[in-house]
Image (cartoon, rainbow, N blue to C red):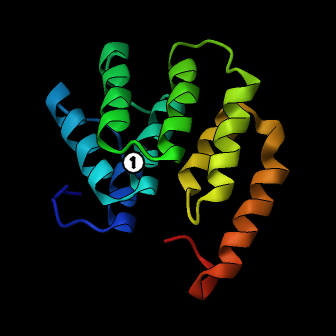
Amino acid sequence: MEFHPQMEEAEFIQAVDAGFLFNTDAEYEEVTRLGCSISDNAALMVGYELATGASHASLEVNLRLLEIMERERPTPVILAAVPVVRSLLREEPVAKEDTLRLLGACKEHSSAWNGLGIVLCADPGLEEECERIMDGWRGAQPGGRPS
C-alpha cells in the first residue's frame, strides 16, 4: 500500500499493519511523521510496531522514530507511550508506573486503540482492563468498531 499525505487514520493503520519494512531510514522517518500528522492513534500504530518488534530498522533508527513522535505529536498519550516503547525496544523491563501512566492516558483518550496494544506488550496481565476500556469506546462509536 502506498503512503500519501491525504491518508485517513484507518488507511494508514492498515498500511503500517501490513508491513513496517522500508528501504531507507528516511522512509521510516517519513511514515512516522505522517502518522503523527494524522492522529494520536496513527502515531501509536508506529509505536505499536516498534513495541512488537515488527520494525526492520536498526535500534538507533527505531529510537529516533520515538523522538520524532515526542517532538511532532507531544500529546499526553504519545508522551506516555514513548518510555514504554523505549524500554521494550531496549529489551529492558518496563517500569510498572510507566505502563500504568500509559493505561491512564489511554483511558482518558477516546480512541487510543494502539496505545492499549502497547500496554499489552508491556504487561499482558492488564488485558481485562484494556478490554473494559475498548468496550467503552466501542459503545461510544457508531457501528461499535475502531476507526
Left or right: 85, with 63 as reference point: right
- Where residue 60 sits, quadrant-wise, is top left
- Residue ID for mark 1: 43
Q: Mark 1: which secondary structure?
A: helix
Amino acid type, label 1: Ala
Outermost bottom residue:
142
Q: Where does residue 100 sit, x and y in percent of width and height? A: 73, 36
Position in image of residue 140 (x %, y %): 65, 80
Q: Quadrant of residue 139?
A: bottom right
Q: Dividing the image into 4 quarters, which one contains the N terminus?
A: bottom left
Q: Can the viewer see residue 24 in this picture? A: no
Give the vertical position of 49 relative to 8 (above or below): above
Q: Residue shown at 17%/31% (left/top)?
A: 23
**Callout 1: 10 Å neighbours few (<14), some, many (20+)?**
many
Q: Which residue sits at x=77%, y=59%?
A: 131
Give above or below for 81 relative to 146: above
